[in-house]
Image (cartoon, rainbow, N blue to C red):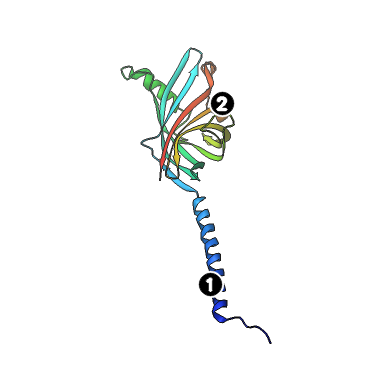
Amino acid sequence: MCDRLDIPVVLKAKLITMKIISFFLLAFTAELLLAETKELTVSIDDSLIVWTGTKVWGKHQGVVRISEGKIHMKDQQLDGGFFVIDMNSIECTDIPDHEPVPKRRLENHLKDPDFFDVGRYPTAKFVITAVKPSPDVENVLIATGDLTIKNTTKPIDVEIKTEKRNDNLFIGRADIRFNRQQWGVAFKGIGDEMVHDQVTLNVFIKAVQ
């Protein structure tokens, strides 16, 4: 004579199995949500780029504005992003306002076709393609990205120091150093030889959700 399982016992077993499956599904879904990439918007009022160019007899320094950008965070870590530079906003800050002629002359020169040519190329852009921790310095990241200036795009490595970061806020500083000749930022004549090729951009970024 064959043993028969009590129907309620079978139902209880099925219910327990369904609960176990539901638990693992919820846990898996929660893990996916935690690992979801969050997109933050760069605050253009709280972000700024300080540029520095050196020459044989000194240097010039100034600011240029960020017009837009996004920062991608994953598990409270920087995972990607981009920012766009408004090249028309180039300003020299180391020539005082009471010397308007040399100040205006330099700013116009930087915007002219023989330098950044902002009439044809009003924006520049940096796009992060990969991020890894610095092997030497804590809270410093090495970001590989594509820098576009005057419609020329080249890969470049950038150091990023993070001050605050979570899935809803990112505050950090990126130091970009590039050889202007490689992006066609040069003018003909002996004057170009007096200007050093390396340009430094100290990028101060704040991004919020």
Q: Which is more N-terminal, label 1 or label 2?
A: 1
What residue do we see at 46% from left, 47% from top? 39
**Where does residue 161 sit, x and y in percent of width and height?**
49, 32
The residue wearing badge 2 is 181
Q: Residues within 10 Å of mark 2 (few under 14, many from 20)?
A: few
Q: Residues within 10 Å of mark 1 (few under 14, many from 20)?
A: few
Which residue type does callout 2 highlight?
Gln
**Where does residue 164 sit, x and y in percent of width and height?**
43, 36
Q: Secondary structure at mark 1?
A: helix
How many labels, in total? 2
* For residue 20, above or below residue 76: below
Answer with the quarter of the image where residue 102 lies: top left
Which residue type does callout 1 highlight?
Leu
Q: Which mark is residue 112?
A: none
Q: Secondary structure at mark 2?
A: helix
Going by the picture, which residue comes out furthest to the left? 98
Task: Identify which residue, 183 or 172, lies in the foreground.
Answer: 172
**Where does residue 121 sit, x and y in percent of width and height?**
47, 35
Camera sees residue 114: no
Camera sees residue 100: yes
Q: CA distance from mark 2 to mark 1?
A: 70 Å
The residue wearing badge 1 is 15
Task: Identify which residue, 121 or 160, lies in the foreground.
Answer: 160
**Residue 159 placement, left or right of 89:** right
